[in-house]
Image (cartoon, rainbow, N blue to C red):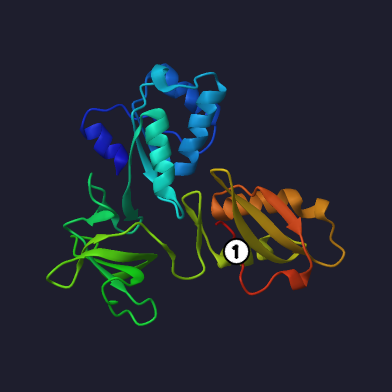
Amino acid sequence: MFDQGARAVGATVIPAGTGASELQADIILKLGVTACVGSTAFFFTLIERLEAMGHALPQGWKLRHAFLGGELGDWAGKRRQLEQRYQVKTWSCYGTADFGLIGYEQRGEAGYRIHDDRYVQICDAATGDPVPPGESGEIVVTTLACGWPMIRFGTGDVSVALEHLPDGGVGRIAPLQGRVGAAVKVREIFIYPAHAERLVREVEGIARAAFAVTRVGNRDEITGLIVLSPGTRAAQVEDKLRQAFSSITRLRLDHIKYVGVDEIGDQLVIDQRN
């Protein structure tokens, strides 16, 4: 979506990713990059890398806009810190892989203004009924887009309506408050309990697995909680475990902790971030 939009207004687009921060920082300096689209955590990593390279102040940068993925917690505070310290304007939107854009920010307004082509309700996750004004609930979206209609699709995201429409829909929503269900979003990617179950099936020598998510500084970290099968040593499975985790989730496992079988309960993805 951003690639096509940037090209449509004549901008040059440089494809990147969430790795090789030193190379990307070098690109920002040498090519005069003016805007960055990515996760909040990785943008902080790029800024820290620029400072480590001796560019502590933004005078030598042309970077002036950052469109960032949302985070739980004091995300607004992080954005204010970026804007005040580095003279960078930050922007965001609310969207999903299923719908694309659902809501967008407007200067002077809190939360996200709902796109005209989306009909949004805030609903009870269990019943599907709209909740009373002021209560939080699951974001449910309807669109009649030609070729991809979706009726009352529960996104799994939790928010509260900031503005109601006469037709019963929602005109504006607050920043996300969390998720419905067991999935946990890490570095812009969801981890599901099924990922832990699949890891056990694919790596011989693992009896049970779970994932704990923490935040160190501005970065999310994932620890694999692993129960080994009888007679299996950690050295026998660690390389395969890391490879399988990356293949299944498209993320990197930061730490591995070998635990007893009684240390893993029913919850297989544990969000320990404050």
As drawn, the residue found furthest toward the left would be 166
Q: Position of residue 7 (x, y in %)?
A: 26, 32
Q: Position of residue 204 (x, y in %)?
A: 74, 61
Q: Position of residue 169 (x, y in %)?
A: 19, 69
As drawn, the residue found furthest toward the right would be 231
Which type of secondary structure does the marked residue at label 1 adopt?
A: strand
Q: Is residue 102 visible?
A: no
Could you tell me which quadrant the C terminus lies in?
Answer: bottom right
Q: Is residue 145 visible?
A: yes
- Vertical placement of residue 206 versus 15, above or below: below
Write down the residue under mark 1.
270
- At 36% across and 55% down in the image, what residue appears? 97
Q: Position of residue 272 (x, y in %)?
A: 59, 59
Amino acid identity at mark 1: Ile
- Disc 1 crowd rating (10 Å Cα; few below 14, some 14-19, many 20+) is some
Camera-side residue of 89 and 167: 89
- At 31% across and 38% down in the image, what residue appears? 3
- At 87% across and 64% down in the image, what residue appears? 231
Q: Does residue 11 appear to the left or right of 270 in the view shown?
A: left
- Vertical placement of residue 126 versus 245, above or below: below
- At 35% across and 71% down in the image, what residue appears? 137
